[in-house]
Image (cartoon, grey):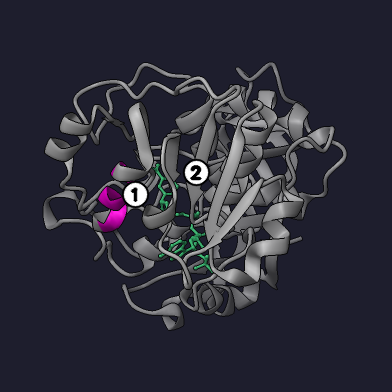
Amino acid sequence: MSTMMKAIRLHAFGGPEVLHYEDAPKPELKAGEVLVRVHAAGVNPPDWYLRDGYKVLPPEWQPQVSFPVIPGTDISGVVVAVADDVKNFSVDDNVYSMVRFPGSLSGDSKAYAEYVTVPASEVALKPGNIDHIHAAGAPMSLLTAWQFMIGLGHNEPNPLQPHRHEPVPLEGKTVLVNGAAGGVGHFAVQLARWKGARVIAVASGKHEAFLHDLGADEVIDYTRTAPEDVVHDVDLVVDSVGGPATGRFLRTLRRGGALFPVFSLGFSGAEEAEKLGVTVSTTQVRSSGAQLAEIGRLLNDGTIRVAIDSEFPLADARKAHERAAQGHIQGKIVLTVA
Ligand SMILES: NC(=O)c1ccc[n+]([C@@H]2O[C@H](COP(=O)([O-])OP(=O)(O)OC[C@H]3O[C@@H](n4cnc5c(N)ncnc54)[C@H](OP(=O)(O)O)[C@@H]3O)[C@@H](O)[C@H]2O)c1
């Protein structure tokens, strides 16, 4: 078998033009891992944060990256080799994974490639009723929504706040999801619905029918109406846009409610939150094969759907990143590999 494969590699930080489709050494299997022939790779914000040199992060948080580096974390594919000590996966298993995150911020996930090694603890069987493209769209976005809203699933320290992030009960509650049509947002809408919440989705107007179809009870077009001017007494806001503007959602919440900014950098409303009796909490998504196995049942029976914004062949990863830079993503961008 050849020791080389095709992959997308960066030799320097920059715009989409630094994504090169080229030959790279095939990864070598280590103890505890499986080797996966990748059929599709999902595209996520950390992929373009890495490509850009993590300009989005404060300098002290910017991971060290050594070139060349293969970006990407999310894959769906077929197991082609299994380390001797791995007992729960076999060659020919169809699997999906979010690979080595957040450990991989410095570029160790390497998903934009024909082959990737993955710790067996981060792998789950792909739901049989969805194809590799849809499965590759799920891991990071759906694990993020799940760990914020349903169950954290680990006891690792929270790098973003001193205390553990705790999801809140959703049944019979009103949940507002901001950025509702995006990767994390469209799963947050569906998880809230599945748990029996009333869902208010905030997105630009073109996503209205899409969001109703996913189960949103109400859709607010933020280009026409500022949600913080018209929404009151919400139990939970999941703000998948986040950033410095997330504090405006504090006044949409009832006393005792919670604001979960998925991108928490720049939030400065801690004092106001305390005055209003609102909990603000965030976390960083972590790889988990166990959670992907649990979530796989919901993907398999159609309770949770993966919406595909667009697909590009691996060789055109540059075009996929150009699409991402245009914003207004509806669901997931996916690279087709095999
Ligand atoms: N904490 C974590 O571990 C974690 C994990 C995953 C992601 N994240 C972060 O979460 C954020 C979202 O990730 P994603 O993958 O969901 O991104 P995405 O797929 O690009 O989705 C972003 C969505 O936000 C919408 N949007 C943009 N501006 C908006 C505004 N002002 N108001 C309302 N909606 C707006 C966009 O469409 P429209 O403008 O057309 O509505 C788009 O659908 C990123 O910053 C990412 O870094 C954090």
Judge whether residue 211 is colored magenta: no
The quadrant holding residue 94 is: top right
Farthest residue, direction bottom? 17
Q: Residue at image x 70%, y 36%?
A: 81
Task: Give the structural element (helix, strand or loop) at label 2.
Answer: strand
Cβ(mark 2) to ligand 1 < 8 Å? no
Disc 2: CA contacts within 10 A as few (<14), some (14-19) or many (>=20): many
Q: Is residue 34 left or right of residue 276?
A: right
Q: Identity of the amino acid at label 1?
A: Phe
Mark pair 1, 2: CA separation: 16 Å
Task: Count the marks.
Answer: 2
The residue nearer to you, when weighing 225 against 191, is 225
Cβ(mark 1) to ligand 1 < 8 Å? yes
Q: For mark 2, what is the residue?
A: 176
Q: Is residue 335 left or right of residue 50?
A: right
The magenta segment is: 245-250
Q: Position of residue 56 (x, y in %)?
A: 26, 62
Q: Main secondary structure of the magenta part?
A: helix
Q: Which disc, if any, is residue 263?
A: 1
